[in-house]
Amino acid sequence: MQGRHFLNIPGPSPIPDRILRAIAMPIIDHRSAAFAELGRTVLEGCKTVFGTTQPVVIYPSSGTGAWEAAIVNTLSPGDTVLMAETGHFATLWKAIAARFGIEVAFIPGDWRRGADPDAIEAHLADDKAHRIKAVMVVHNETSTGATSRIAEIRRAIDAAGHPALFMVDTISSLASVDYRHDEWQVDVTVSGSQKGLMLPPGLSFNAVSQKALAAASSSRMARSYWDWQEMIKLNAGGFFPYTPATNLLYGLREALAMLQEEGLANVFARHRRLADACRAAVQAWGLEVLCEVPAEQSPVLTAVMMPEGHDADRFRRIALERFNISLGSGLGKVAGKVFRIGHLGECNELSLIGALAGVEMGLAAADVPHQRGGVDAAMALLRD
Amino acid sequence: MQGRHFLNIPGPSPIPDRILRAIAMPIIDHRSAAFAELGRTVLEGCKTVFGTTQPVVIYPSSGTGAWEAAIVNTLSPGDTVLMAETGHFATLWKAIAARFGIEVAFIPGDWRRGADPDAIEAHLADDKAHRIKAVMVVHNETSTGATSRIAEIRRAIDAAGHPALFMVDTISSLASVDYRHDEWQVDVTVSGSQKGLMLPPGLSFNAVSQKALAAASSSRMARSYWDWQEMIKLNAGGFFPYTPATNLLYGLREALAMLQEEGLANVFARHRRLADACRAAVQAWGLEVLCEVPAEQSPVLTAVMMPEGHDADRFRRIALERFNISLGSGLGKVAGKVFRIGHLGECNELSLIGALAGVEMGLAAADVPHQRGGVDAAMALLRD
Amino acid sequence: MQGRHFLNIPGPSPIPDRILRAIAMPIIDHRSAAFAELGRTVLEGCKTVFGTTQPVVIYPSSGTGAWEAAIVNTLSPGDTVLMAETGHFATLWKAIAARFGIEVAFIPGDWRRGADPDAIEAHLADDKAHRIKAVMVVHNETSTGATSRIAEIRRAIDAAGHPALFMVDTISSLASVDYRHDEWQVDVTVSGSQKGLMLPPGLSFNAVSQKALAAASSSRMARSYWDWQEMIKLNAGGFFPYTPATNLLYGLREALAMLQEEGLANVFARHRRLADACRAAVQAWGLEVLCEVPAEQSPVLTAVMMPEGHDADRFRRIALERFNISLGSGLGKVAGKVFRIGHLGECNELSLIGALAGVEMGLAAADVPHQRGGVDAAMALLRD
Amino acid sequence: MQGRHFLNIPGPSPIPDRILRAIAMPIIDHRSAAFAELGRTVLEGCKTVFGTTQPVVIYPSSGTGAWEAAIVNTLSPGDTVLMAETGHFATLWKAIAARFGIEVAFIPGDWRRGADPDAIEAHLADDKAHRIKAVMVVHNETSTGATSRIAEIRRAIDAAGHPALFMVDTISSLASVDYRHDEWQVDVTVSGSQKGLMLPPGLSFNAVSQKALAAASSSRMARSYWDWQEMIKLNAGGFFPYTPATNLLYGLREALAMLQEEGLANVFARHRRLADACRAAVQAWGLEVLCEVPAEQSPVLTAVMMPEGHDADRFRRIALERFNISLGSGLGKVAGKVFRIGHLGECNELSLIGALAGVEMGLAAADVPHQRGGVDAAMALLRD
């Protein structure tokens, strides 16, 4: 496998050279004035990306940790929450909640669309006793390539007049898909570093509303590492209560600078354009996009359904061996049945076309029934 | 502040160029065969450093997370543990245990020595009912520069015939001070990446005995991120249950290679020699080492007591401004009263002398009463 | 211009990450044993790439310097040499010879083919007095994308029974196109670092035969920096007569390792395959390849003729602005009339397709008459 | 040899991390607008460091090449120049001149001082016929640690009323020692990248006066690579006539930024202070500094004479093996008799002390007669 690898999994996304160089800077004393400046820069800079003026907590952990953090800071054992089965990651988040003694009302789903605002409204309207403490939704389901309409879900909660907290996982959407923590009155936004932020994995985030902070003060869940209080207190000075992942924070500073240079609105538009091109290719191949609702198809990734009788993982292995491209596997219920094309982060027109060529030639190499012309269709769209 | 910064805090320690380059490699698919090879290499390679053939769990987190992991995997709310107040970090670990509903019998200490094996034996002998579920000790107290004699504490536990788990924090000793998880029958060894392993912060470790695993299966503590079971299961194939901090694992692979090239025994001897030289300097300055027990003085750092009436932080600030050196501050009870010199990781004779010169000239610049000749004394020792 | 830049000029070629990291290693004493090991490794390793067991001299300079070196080491003012006008770079080399008082018999050419072995043979056969001291040919004309058939030119020289030295410029062919310094009895092979060797510019090479060394001893040209003698003498121990470009030599060591890992034969085959795909695209676009002789079309780059009335540089600018791709400009006689696509070094299938998409979409964006389907045609070829 | 290497040769000097990261940036098209901006920045930025508003030519070559460039651009075969034997490098420069048919009047020297302005004036005054075309002096003799007083030599030339060109080698002084190309009316200032500029070797410089340019137009020396004319013409647009060493130019941009941040006056003062500290150490050891004239002792390096009967290279080898420090060897006439301590570039107080400790402990390890206290003496000086 010669030459540059095409990493087209839906995250970790390729790390830009600028960020790789940033994380390779010598480490500094995390109790120094120089560090405080770094700390304040990233803590403040993050807010824009989340669309918030409220605190953003940064953990040295995977996104999985930030999922747990959202739960253990706000809920108590025995609490009930409402979640929607949008795919594998929603299911994993549910499992974590269950481990902490949370009852999850799980609105079933077929993994081919985002969470249904109407169903959520109906559940909440039924919950006269306000036993549901939180509505927890995945913004961009990385396993299916379906986004949930967060603004509409907010309206659904409001329509039901329900006081539940609203917690949203943006691990694979942040800095790729338009997102507005404050405007949508989200209480906890969970995120991670290795997708739209173009960083290595190892940082995760909780953006936190005043309502969430109030919930934290009455939560009976034991917690320490994930506890917001001490974090927010020390963050005020640019510091952290325990040793931060300084080198990754260097990378975060660089990533925030890159996003600012391009402009968030442009970043979002670029992701949409590339995603549309990818879907044009899939359509031309005669294959089916897993997400059935066009308006909910993800700007970040496209999950493609394999023709009946063809194994997605065999195809992915052949594409890797022949064309040096990594594609995402099907996860959970759709294992072996879909492959996923990531088009996020530093992706641009030509790197997307290269990736789509890898898929198109890989389909041929793996004898997967398809029509040619996917790359052409993508180019037709990007040309304009 | 021109030229190379001298980072002589007791961790994060300076990151060698080799490791900085390693973490700047492009990221790969964490579900690929290439990753599995990386995963197996580091998971296996770690074991040597811990002195174990049993599983070592690697978390994407700070060392603080690995402290929590040791607790939530093995204990249950209401359990009692025995700890020794060796300093600030032992106190922090105790506070975490308390947050999870653990009763801590805390053997008081004056922060000037390691944990007392006799006191531990006495406590355990008194505990006829075996209410104490674990003995938890910090191997190298980073706040004081005192090491605890783990082998002797093991013997104390055995002498008391007590079945308690033995959990040891080696965050600042691993790969710097001789340590033997298996031989000393430690059940959980906690560690971190940013000290003797010379990595950035962001990885932490639990080395886990069979007895600890058995305890985990009966623990009633809610846990997910820190749970050993799924980790160990997926580690068998070189994988992780959630996105690993791949770039830091690249660094770990390089660090393990460096340690192997030098030889662990040589690494330990080098730390002892440099530490002795540092202590010779402190003595020559007429200052006092915080750790009163020579045999327990740390190979990793030296905490130095300021003369009465002189503020350690003012001195540290002046040394930084004038000589571009970062020294560790006093923490907790000894804040302002001590400063700490780190001599770990990639430290060698000449970089230590440079650091000691920074201290000696900084003492003069800050008008701290002292005698000259510390650097000379250190050189006399290193010359031989 | 977001995302990864596509650098598809015919050199400097994109520098692989491995090499970028290698050149970023701390510098060492160039008179140390550690350096000697580096020196010996690269001096010896180079030979394989040149297909020689004879000395290869490495200069800290551009390839232009190595052109000059070949001249000033072997010739004397007033000497006559035979060159072939294959394009811009042959013309530049001729101009350098002229500056040093060399008479150049310049076989005219139309820039659409390599040097003609028959014409060379005829010239040499006519030169009964053996006034021609050297035949100087460019292996791969970077300005036109035409390769010259070096083995056949060797046979032409031999057929003419002429004693002239044979000097070949492989600046843009080395490590991309099959080349055999010894087998083809080349006397001086000139090369550079920034093409097939995938290094930054700054190193250049002369591979030198015994016959060339003999010529050097009778040359009356003043020289110092470029002088072979002292170089070869010190190279024996792994050293250089003046300060070498150590960091670029680190890169060279890494590049040689990469070439060895892939295997030179595979490297050459990969370049041919990618070049064929590029030509298939050009043909599908209905555009003309500058090099008219299929067997001489370069594995390294393809120069494409613009339709009459369309400015190549305007097209290149639009492609850069819209699709973040750099293409090579027309040089000298063909300025504005051709653009050049580089497909060398770490280029692979998918990065080539990305680049061809940039050309195809750029042609549309610049309103250059063409047919679509170039990328498709390239994929059809690469699929098999 | 563990830990950070102390590279205390008088160049290449240690490359700061910032510069290593800069040279590891991906390469760009050297004919692009982005490159032109880089080119203009470094070509303009260089001028401040040379103290000139006139052109500075940048070569992709070692400093040795820039020596040759100064000669072949301004002189003609048979010309006479006046040089001073300040040491090994002056002797090498003389040898290069001789290779190009230049007659060198070489004022003999004992390698223990800079060039003598009075002797130069006397020679020029004697040259009524103005046969001497140039006075060529080494500013900082890297082999001896003696600087020549360039301003005074300028005055000597003027006092003699002699029209000779004035050419100065600042390879090891530029950006470390105060230097003023315009004010001192130097015609050609030669320099290199790997000393005060803290870059890898591979770039060299000629700062060129109008008088030198005029001389170039009447020079009868054959030249191409080193020719100023085409260089200066293309430099106007930020470009170069042949492929530039782009990655090293990235480094140069960063180095110029670092020098500007510190301020050149501060850079010079820092070098003087560190040099004084080094000399204080040598004196305390009871050893002799090679340069006998205190005012001419170099801010860049100190050459130390070994006691009779002791081999400098054996001492250096032992210091390297025991303490991981590289010291400079004696060159030419003083081979084996002196060792050289570099204290230039990113050197600061503590890294100097580390290096001096390596010397002091190395002298003991090698059984070289000396008194202790050198490091102490250096500290006493730096403390104030």
Image: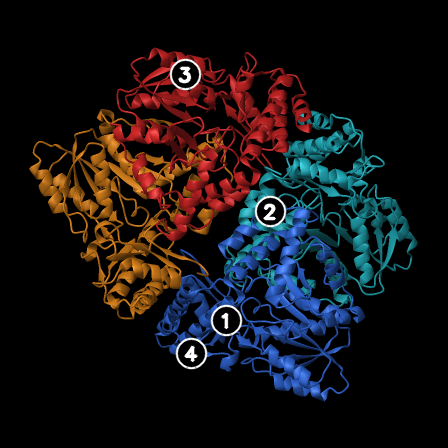
Chain colours: A blue, B cyan, C orange, D red
Crowd band around label 2 with a 10 angstrom C-alpha radius: few (<14), some (14–19), many (20+): many
Q: CA distance from mark 3 to mark 2?
A: 67 Å
Q: Secondary structure at mark 1?
A: strand
Q: Quadrant of the N terminus of chain A?
A: bottom left
Disc 2 on helix, strand or loop? helix
Disc on the earlier residue, 1 or 4: 4
Q: What chain does badge 1 belong to?
A: A
Residue at numbered disc 2: B256
Quick check: B150 left or right of A59? Answer: right
Distance between the alpha carbons at the discs numbered 2 and 1: 36 Å
Using the image, tell me which numbered label, if any, was put on residue A287: 4
- Closer mark to the observer between disc 4 and disc 3: 3
Q: Amino acid at mark 2?
A: Leu
Mark nearest the camera among 2 and 1 is: 1
Q: Is residue B23 above or below residue C212?
A: below
Q: Which residue is mark 1?
A: A301
Q: Dot 3: what SS?
A: helix
User: Mark 3 and mark 1: span between their CA atoms?
Assistant: 78 Å
Residue sitting nearer the eye, B76 or A216? A216
- Mark 4 belongs to which amino acid? Leu
The percent coordinates of residue C364 (x first, y second) are: 31, 68
Residue D128, percent across and down? 31, 12
Examine the rendered structure and indicate whether residue B160 appears above or below residue D230.
below
- Label 3 amino acid? Ala
Q: In the image shown, does A136 or D151 lie closer to the viewer?
A: D151
**In which chain is the residue bearing label 4?**
A
Q: Would you say D121 lies left or right of D307 here?
A: left
Q: Chain letter of disc 3?
A: D
Q: Quadrant of residue A375?
A: bottom left
Distance, label 4 to label 2, CA atoms, is 46 Å
Q: Is residue C166 above or below residue D173?
A: below
Q: Is residue C97 left or right of residue D322?
A: left
